[in-house]
Image (tube, rainbow, N blue to C red):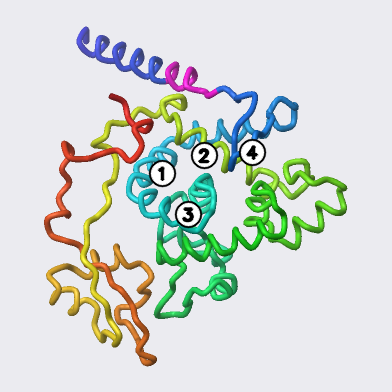
Amino acid sequence: MTNLIRILTITILFLLSACMNILHAQPEVPQSVVFCNKQIDLTRFDRYERMDRELLAFTYMHSTSIQMIKKANRYFPVVEPILKEEGVPDDFKYLMVIESNLNPNARSVAGAAGLWQFMKITGREYGLEVNDNIDERYHIEKATRAACKYLKDAYAKYNDWVAVAASYNAGQARISTQLEKQFTDDALDLHLVEETARYVYRIIAAKIMFNNPAQFGFVLKASDLYVPIPYREITMTTGIDDLARWAKSQGTTYALLKNLNPWLRQNFMQNRSHRTYVLKVPLKEGLTHHPEKVVPHNKNWVTK
């Protein structure tokens, strides 16, 4: 009985300690933040409270927030160079974060898909192949370039990256209309439906979290992060009747092939028009997790 009481006491103290740590992990709202090289004042009460709400949301979505940091180690190295090459501010990778939680297979109830959550019609408009067999909204590199095209088109209209970010959620027509109707040139001052009103603040909150996860109570080691999967590329100009059989012939599995090529939506690949597709085949030597070899893409994500 004495041992049982001792165990229960230790357990209760541990849980209380954990709860106190979580309470103390609540991040403070900064007086201002920089988004796409623009200084944004957060001292006005409405901006302060909106930012506070989003910071709290990231703080208490423990598993989701931690998973996003882990996945960023795999996907940010792919996305960042494309944003830079396309002339889009690096901060827009955080838009991708809140759109999909860094799940390359994400699909919304409305039908938006992939890391950048393109709808079918928008994806096609920006050069992505979208059908039942091939859906390039799930192609990380191609979807990122398509997103860059959209963002640059919006910037040509607004000349303001904050308005561009808001338009990614609400659409350019709605943001343009509301800027005119509400007599303002600042998208953060618009009265919008709740989802859009929160949108830019969520992006900024994601940036704050990724720059200092420990402030949110997320303590990770380098070995906790997900590493990029090494692969070789095979160029195909013909179809593949059986992807499982083809994967086996390449020394891998169907599951791993689909993991690296989520844009392949069926168990076969049609190619009657002889288009050029590049398939990623994982390298055997990169399939084993080696904790001691994990290198963090951003040192701020991990404790020393």
Q: Give whichever of discs 1 and 4 has the lower sequence position.
A: 4
- Circle nearer the viewer, 1 or 4: 4
Q: Is residue 23 above or below residue 89?
A: above
Q: Quadrant of the N terminus?
A: top left
In the drawing, does residue 174 fall left or right of residue 258? right
Give the labeled residue for mark 4: 38
In the drawing, does residue 258 fall left or right of residue 59? left
Q: Give whichever of discs 4 and 2 has the lower sequence position.
A: 4
Residue 72 position within the rendered picture, expressed as x and y whole percent measured from the top left: 38, 45
Say whether marks 1 and 4 touch (CB < 8 Å): no
Q: Give whichever of discs 3 and 4 has the lower sequence position.
A: 4
Q: Give whichever of discs 3 and 2 has the lower sequence position.
A: 3
- Mark number for residue 68? 1
Residue shown at 17%/46% (left/top)?
289
Badge 1, how many Cα within 10 Å: few under 14, some, many 20+?
many
Q: CA distance from mark 4 to mark 2?
A: 16 Å
Badge 4, how many Cα within 10 Å: few under 14, some, many 20+?
few
Q: CA distance from mark 3 to mark 2?
A: 17 Å
Q: CA distance from mark 3 to mark 4?
A: 18 Å
Q: Amino acid at mark 1?
A: Met
Say whether marks 3 and 4 touch (CB < 8 Å): no
Magenta highlight range: 19-27
